[in-house]
Image (spheres, grey):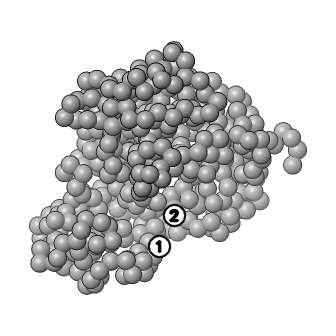
Amino acid sequence: MTSPDILPNAQVRQHFLDRHQLRKPPLGTRLDQTLTRLNFVQVDSINTLARAHDLILWSRQQNYRPPALRKMVDHSRQPFEAWTHDASILPMAAFPHWRHKFIRDEKQVQKRWKAWHRGDFLAQTETVLEQIARHGPLGSGDVGAQEQRGTGGWWDWHPSKTALEYLWRTGRITVSRREGFRKLYDLTENVIPKEIGSAQPSFNESLDWACTGALRALGFATAKEISDFYDFVTASEARAWIARGLRSGALREIKTEAANGQLRDRVIFTQDWPSLQEPLAVSNRLRILSPFDPALRNRARAEEIFGFSYRIEVFVPAARRQYGYYVFPILEGSALIAHIEIKADRKKNIIEIIGFWPEAKVKFSAARIERLIAELKRICLLVECRDISGIEILRRM
């Protein structure tokens, strides 16, 4: 492989951010287009500041507000909720291909959940389906009325709650709407538009769809990164897909340069190589990102590209945390420059700054601090807070 096949780290960052819609100012106006380009957004229950999916979309579309997504999912039926590597919202066009993931997940979920969950949840599936067919959309509190409730952890669901989640993971029911953050499920045929639900792509067509979508979203990738993107195809299937693409000329091997100068073998679409070699201007806007942002979901990949280590410490005992309970990464231009712990105090209508940790070689000048405060003020509009407390923590840096 010759030197022209090496993508320098500067361009790696620029094109990485471009694929993740973080290169330009967040001025998008079409939520459906934003979601389609991202392929999916992760849904998470933690709400110390804003829920993950809301902050992800807001980071790319500053006029976004949470009701807009719920309207699209619950009423317009443009996206649907399903399980990728975690609970996610995907464009409705993905649903026909998701049938094959439902089939694959069924065996895995049965095996794991029989060991993890109490009671015989499989014995409750038909009863739960009958209840939904008879009464319409139901949540976990509406099923298994005679069963002992658990402690609240996923490992202690009552059998009918487990059956409900199992039926969702395997495609027989679908999230119809949410009330607050509570999911209400209906029969899939009552949620998915008929023209979408009737489509029946072959497994090979869906495999090609998943690998193609992953590589287009990532720009450059290894077989494992393609496999991990949707958690749909296996690494061996991704390797075989890559091999076919290399033979046909549709794909090309390159090396990408990491932040530390090391090179990594990856593949790209051959037609993308000329544009990938072109430098891209990156907005120097300072942004606070969700810990579950698509740009950071693959922690190892993000660390390789940016030299920035990020780990969720929610389940780490307080005394052992490096930073804080729920910490947000800060992006400036094409660099990740700091961690910040903030939360919304909704009783006081303020965003509270709890902790702030710039990267070792990053100096927070007065001007940079003001730009961070400006970003916090913008977030106030998203989370409906009036003010910010703890600014003195920033000024001590």
- Give the farthest residue toward the front: 319
Q: Nearer the viewer, residue 373 or 68?
A: 373
- Residue at figure coordinates x 86%, y 41% from the top left: 3
At x 27% / y 83%, what residue is drawn?
119
Residue contact at pointers 1 and 2, CB within 8 angstroms:
yes
> Dot 1 corresponds to which residue?
104
Point 47% across, 73% down: residue: 104
Instruction: Decide which of 139, 386 is in the foreground and name it.
Output: 386
**Farthest residue toward the right?**
2
Q: Position of residue 162 (x, y in %)?
A: 28, 73
Residue at the farthest top position: 367
Q: Residue at x 27, y 44 (%)?
A: 70
- Residue on which disc 2 sits: 232
Do we see residue 59 in this rendering? yes
Q: Amino acid at mark 1?
A: Arg
In the image, residue 161 above or below residue 84: below
Q: How many marks?
A: 2
Q: Which is more N-terminal, label 2 or label 1?
A: 1
Residue 374, by quadrant, is top left
Q: Amino acid at mark 2?
A: Phe
In the displayed structure image, the side of residue 190 where residue 216 appears, left or right: right
x, y percentage for residue 244? 71, 62
Whole-percent x and y of residue 57?
40, 38
Q: Secondary structure at mark 1?
A: helix
> Cα distance, mark 1 to mark 2?
8 Å
- Say which element carries label 2: loop
Is residue 283 visible to us here?
no
